[in-house]
Amino acid sequence: MRAAALTPEVNAVLAEALPGFPAATGATSITADGTPVGWNFTATDSDAVDAQGRPVDVWVYISVVRPSAALNADTVVCAGGGWVACQERTLGDGTVLRSGLVRHEMQTDHAVVTATTPFAFAVLPDGRLVDARSSVNWGPDAIEGDFTLATGHPLTVEALEELVTSPQLEQLPVP
């Protein structure tokens, strides 16, 4: 199976959780030694603006993978990792859901620029991971401050929680 065959299903879930967000493209997720472990999907919103009205590109990365040495239930924890806010709870089916906000920092030619974006991870009862992370590209000419998405943008912690706990993503086959 190829990621392209699963992309329409992922995009249906993406459209429900993040209305108006552009469609994703997919690829096989592989370990450093070349072993396929799942799927990665990326969607980019190039029409977004931050809270000050500045244009930004917003990316959402979605992965559905089986555990590997690099990514497993023990590496996706709330302790550490630069989280601004992180909560963990166990759902009725045994899925462990971790979600919150993370701060990204980048040195540009003009200043240190930061962005705070949501994330969500679901560790399924069978050990597979469904992961949704986001980031903001504020461009090389950014000269000030913390980039936060404008009010009303569909990218929220709750939207990513909905995405990673969707039955459609939980049921995707992994290589």
Image (cartoon, helix red, strand yellow):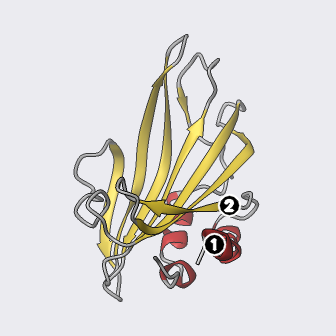
Using the image, determine if residue 112 lies above or below residue 78.
above
Using the image, determine if residue 33 lies above or below residue 49.
below
Q: Quadrant of residue 136?
A: top right
Is 118 on the left-hand or right-hand side of 143?
A: left
Mark 2 touching mark 1, by CB under 8 A?
yes
Write the residue at 24% across / 46% down: 80
Is 115 on the left-hand or right-hand side of 77?
A: right
Q: Which residue is mark 1?
A: 10
For residue 144, which numbered disc appears in the image? none
How many residues crowd around disc 2 within 10 Å: few (fewer than 14), some, or many (20 or more)? many
- Residue 157: give x, y in percent of width and height: 50, 59
What is the residue that sits farthest to the bottom in this orientation?
A: 93
Q: Quadrant of the N terminus?
A: bottom right
Write the residue at 29% across / 65% down: 72
Seen from the viewer's position, the closer of residues 96 and 156 is 96
- Residue 133: give x, y in percent of width and height: 49, 54
Seen from the viewer's position, the closer of residues 21 and 75 is 75
Secondary-structure class at tag 2: loop
Q: Earlier in the sequence, mark 2 or mark 1?
A: 1
Mark 1: amino acid: Val
Mark 2: amino acid: Ala
Q: Which residue is mark 2?
A: 24
How many numbered dots are placed on residues in this image? 2
Is 37 on the left-hand or right-hand side of 17?
A: left
Seen from the viewer's position, the closer of residues 93 and 87 is 93
Using the image, determine if residue 153 lies above or below residue 158.
above
- Residue 14: give x, y in percent of width and height: 65, 68
Secondary-structure class at tag 1: helix
